[in-house]
Amino acid sequence: MALTARNKISLLRFPSFPGLSRRLSTSPHLSSGVQYLTRGRDPDLAYCSTPGRSPGVIFFPGFLSNMDGTKALALEGYCRAAGLAYTRFDYRGMGQSQGSIENCSISTWKQDCLDVLDQVTTGKQIIVGSSMGGWLMLLIAMNRPERIHALVGIATAADFVKKHWEQAPIIVQNQWKEQGVYTFPSDYTDTGTVSLGYNWIQDSLPYCILGTRLPISCPVRLIHGLRDADVPYQTSAQILEELDAKDVDLILRKSGEHRMSEPEDLELIIDTVDKLVNTLGEGGN
């Protein structure tokens, strides 16, 4: 893996963020009430928004995840303590939002992200994207560069739909095409399975970005665990190389797994966001 001089790669243990344990234990009780963004033809989106100063922080969850996850609530606790505006939400077909996942794709979830950014938040934002949320984070940064203060990707799963399709056995691919929907085993649902429409593949492929120049100029931090069994850290390394931005760090955590939800992982994520807020200030880059 070649790293240019303009980028930095770090493999280290970050110090504890002051007061993190208190914030993690209290954040679920401080959670703001659920509201719904009504969008006419598109399904309503559930979200929670906490007022505060700029830059705001907005969390993009991963595939089959939701806004009540450990990382989302930990970030809410940090933002409340720091006086920062914060928004977390559920994509259509997930969590408390309306819609069926069988009718979703990266294109529909990208529109969800744009609608929340445009209609719920104001001013510059730090987007924290987890797994699939990291892929969406990059797509949104290319669509709304004027709204982005910085990006923090956690186990960024760019192009994972393409990988999922290419690794599926031919018999599965054929059944998917013929039936229009296919049911897969999943460790991320209560039922142990998830049904995905064939449009999930077809509508998502045009949004694949690996292997192309990424015209993003804001500061970017990519955090990845070396023990990630779902998305290899080389994906984040490739994104680093393809970004136009000069202020880009790849932070590798030796013990980190895909979820990155252990207390030490949360410290690292919050510390990273805090440094972006305080180093760049309210004026952005």
Image (cartoon, helix red, strand yellow):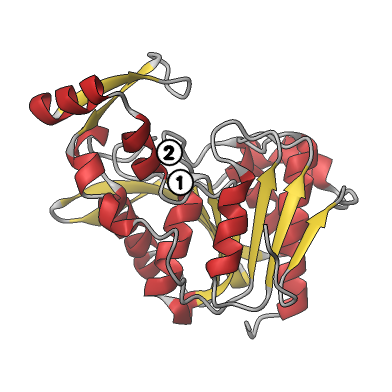
User: Which percent across, then down, holds residue 245?
Assistant: 59, 77
Image height of 210 relative to 68, above or below: below
Mark 2 element type: loop
The quarter of the displayed image where residue 222 is located: bottom right
Q: Residue at x 32, y 28 (%)?
A: 168
Q: Label 1 crowding class (10 Å Cα cut-off): few <14, some 14-19, many 20+?
A: many
Residue that numbered label 2 is attached to: 63
Left or right: residue 34 compared with residue 232: left
Mark 1 element type: helix
Image height of 59 relative to 5, above or below: above
Between 247 and 33, the one lying in front of the other is 247
User: Which percent across, then down, holds residue 221?
Assistant: 66, 62
Between 185 and 273, the one lying in front of the other is 185
Left or right: residue 263 compared with residue 55: right
Left or right: residue 263 compared with residue 129: right
Q: Quadrant of the N terminus?
A: bottom right
Q: Residue at x 59, y 67 (%)?
A: 241
User: Which percent across, then down, holds residue 5?
Assistant: 75, 76
Confirm or deny contact between disc 1 and disc 2 (CB under 8 A): yes
Q: Label 2 crowding class (10 Å Cα cut-off): few <14, some 14-19, many 20+?
A: some
Question: How many numbered markers are drawn?
Answer: 2
Identity, as a three-letter code, of the amino acid under mark 1? Met
Q: Residue at x 66, y 47 (%)?
A: 224
Q: Quadrant of the C terminus?
A: bottom right
Q: Residue furthest left?
A: 178
Identity, as a three-letter code, of the amino acid under mark 2? Phe
Q: Residue at x 67, y 42 (%)?
A: 27
C-alpha gap between disc 1 and disc 2: 6 Å
The answer, for residue 151, to whether it is visible in the render is no
